[in-house]
């Protein structure tokens, strides 16, 4: 028995060191800031937010409708300008570079990203009566919290999750991630506070966000509030390759029915 105790003690110490390492390095495993890049067809617009300067790529258009976009944790949002400009011709576009990303100052964190989202929305809303919000992957967590706090016209969540903690549990079942994680993005907890119509887009072959996590988020909204489409044959980062993705999002943002797109997207 005495010979086992040192081994158990060594394992316990190693486990504790591992937990400490995960705790102190977690943001480096969540956020992957992108460098400064060009965005042909868009212009840079700067928003002050709690001492930081947030760079937003914008494509201004006449009319009272706008779209606010929050991307993935390693996404250069400038890469969406051409696609979005073609897909949403009746809306001004605002693609947000998170703090620390693409020329924005600061370091990313959940509280920081939410503060910046609120600051951007409040300035955009001054100019536009209808502001829709699209959040993809990590950005879905920002988008849900924004829609819970502001009068968003429509909300589109692309490859989303109910909680970043629950996603982490899928990968680190042997770690107490519920105790370790600081940036939790508890979208399902905020969903009941969202009043806007919601579209949830799931990649049929998503290898990063388990489908159960996306469905759990959709179920957290009021009955009938969230429409879910599954786009077959594409993964988490290849969703753009399917025309069904933009067709469904454009239909929702224009206020048109998407029943046909839903049936085609879910067919196997």
Image (spheres, rainbow, N blue to C red):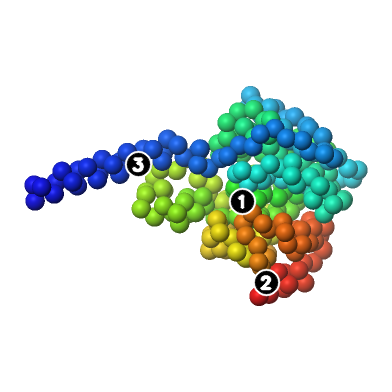
Residue closer to the observer: 223 or 219: 219
- Residue 187 visible: yes
Q: Secondary structure at mark 2?
A: helix
Q: Secondary structure at mark 1?
A: loop
Q: Residues within 10 Å of mark 2 (few under 14, many from 20)?
A: some
Q: Quadrant of the C terminus?
A: bottom right
Q: Which is nearer the N-term, disc 3 or disc 1?
A: 3
Which residue: 79% across, 58% down?
250
Q: Which is nearer the N-term, disc 3 or disc 2?
A: 3
Q: Residues within 10 Å of mark 1 (few under 14, many from 20)?
A: many
Give percent across and percent down for residue 141: 59, 48
Up-down: is 28 above or below 250?
above
Residue closer to the observer: 214 or 221: 214
Residue closer to the observer: 171 or 108: 171
Give percent across and percent down for residue 1: 8, 51
- The reply, left or right, for residue 165 in relation to residue 47 is left
Residue annotated with mark 3: 18
Residue annotated with mark 2: 266
Query: CA separation, marks 3 and 1?
Result: 27 Å
Residue annotated with mark 1: 137
Give percent across and percent down for residue 134: 70, 50
Query: CA separation, marks 2 and 1?
Result: 20 Å
């Amino acid at each position: 028995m005495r010979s086992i105790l040192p081994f158990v003690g060594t394992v316990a110490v190693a486990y504790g060191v591992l937990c400490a390492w995960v705790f102190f390095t977690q943001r480096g495993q969540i956020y992957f800031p992108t460098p400064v890049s060009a965005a042909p067809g868009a212009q840079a617009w700067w928003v002050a937010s709690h001492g930081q300067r947030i760079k937003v790529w914008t494509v201004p258009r006449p009319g009272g409708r706008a779209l606010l976009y929050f991307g993935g944790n390693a996404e250069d949002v400038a890469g969406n300008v051409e696609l979005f400009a073609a897909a949403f011709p009746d809306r001004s576009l605002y693609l947000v570079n998170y703090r620390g990303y693409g020329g924005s100052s600061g370091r990313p964190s959940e509280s920081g990203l939410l503060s910046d989202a609120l600051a951007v929305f409040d300035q955009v809303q001054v100019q536009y009566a209808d502001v829709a919000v699209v959040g993809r992957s990590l950005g879905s967590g920002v988008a849900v919290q924004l829609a819970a706090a502001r009068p968003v016209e429509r909300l589109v969540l692309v490859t989303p999750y109910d909680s970043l903690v629950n996603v982490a549990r899928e990968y680190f079942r042997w770690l107490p991630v519920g105790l370790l994680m600081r940036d939790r993005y508890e979208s399902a907890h905020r969903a009941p506070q969202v009043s806007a119509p919601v579209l949830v887009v799931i990649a049929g072959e998503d290898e990063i966000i388990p489908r159960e996590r996306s469905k759990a988020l959709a179920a957290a909204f009021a009955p009938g509030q969230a429409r879910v489409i599954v786009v077959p044959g594409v993964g988490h980062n290849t969703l753009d390759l399917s025309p069904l993705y933009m067709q469904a999002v454009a239909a929702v943002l224009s206020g048109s029915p998407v029943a046909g797109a839903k049936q085609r997207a879910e067919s196997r």
